[in-house]
Structure formats: structure tokens, C-alpha cells
Image (cartoon, rainbow, N blue to C red):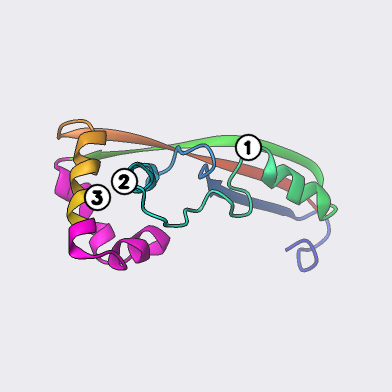
Amino acid sequence: MARVTRGEGAIVASVWDHAGERTPVSTFWRAARDLGLTTRDESALAGARRGHLVELFKGSGLRHVEDAVLVARVKYSSFDEWWKPFSHGVGPAGAAYLALTPDQKGHLRERWKALLPPAPFELASFAWAARGMV
């Protein structure tokens, strides 16, 4: 992005805090680990840990790099409203879910219910953000 941005242009990016397990899918991965499932989460992705976006921005030669934490809150009226997107195979978590056996899916669903608050509930998710100048 730095290569194709005009001089004095700004570059901004954000990534969910996967390494800190403060994301919309954290409960999914926590339940999978609790059940001993060997699914690969997103915690090792670029920018997914504290300070990594800043490292990447500075490493690409950007100047005046700043960071921030973004918060998103989502209200769910039912457990099914939270769970349904996984059943459609959306993203890495959804793909991992679809690859499970029916028994594993059932156990995972029950573990999620135990980890989440009773409905209706609200979940807060956090993302790392960075801004730098070319």
C-alpha cells in the first residue's frame, strides 16, 4: 500500500484482536479448544496481536505511525442468531465448523451455549488499528 499511495497520503488498517481472543469468533475457538478439536484459529494472522500493525507499518517505511483500539458491540436476541453464521461456512471459523462430524458439531454447539451469556446478550469485540503517512 505504501508503494502505490501518493506522497503525504495516509494508510489505515485494522485487524480483529485474534491473539487476545477479543473478537466476534473468540467463543467459537475457545469452545473448539475446550473440546480438544484441532482447528487452526486466526491468532497468528498479520496484525492480529497488540502492536503488530504498528510494526508492519513502520517496517514498510511509513511515518508518523499511530495506533488505536476499536470496539464493536453487537446485541443478539438469541443464541441461534449468534450461531447461525457459522453453519453457513463463513470465514475460517465457519469452514472449520463445516469440516466437523455431526457429533462434533453438536458438542461444540453445547459448549458455545455454556460459554455465552443467556439471551438476549451483547458481545464486545476489539480490533487493532494503525494509521501512517507515506
Residue 106 screen position, x and y as percent: 17, 54
Crowdedness near tag 2: few (<14), some (14–19) or many (≥20) residues, C-alpha within 10 Å: few
Q: Are marks 1 and 2 in contact (CB under 8 Å)?
A: no
Say left or right for 29 vs 86: right
Q: Which residues are magenta?
A: 77-104
Q: How many marks?
A: 3
Residue 10 vs residue 72, the one in the foreground: 72
Say left or right for 9 vs 42: right
Which amino acid type is marked by label 3? Leu
Q: Are marks 3 and 2 in contact (CB under 8 Å)?
A: yes
Query: In percent of the image, x 61 and y 42: which residue is there?
Result: 49
Q: Quick one: label 3 or label 2, which is nearer the N terminus? A: 2
Locate residue 46: give its quadrant: bottom right
Say left or right for 31 vs 52: left
| Residue at which label 1 appears | 50
Which amino acid type is marked by label 1? Arg
Query: In percent of the image, x 54 and y 42: which residue is there?
Result: 19
| Residue at which label 2 appears | 35
**Does the segment drawn in magenta span residue 79?**
yes
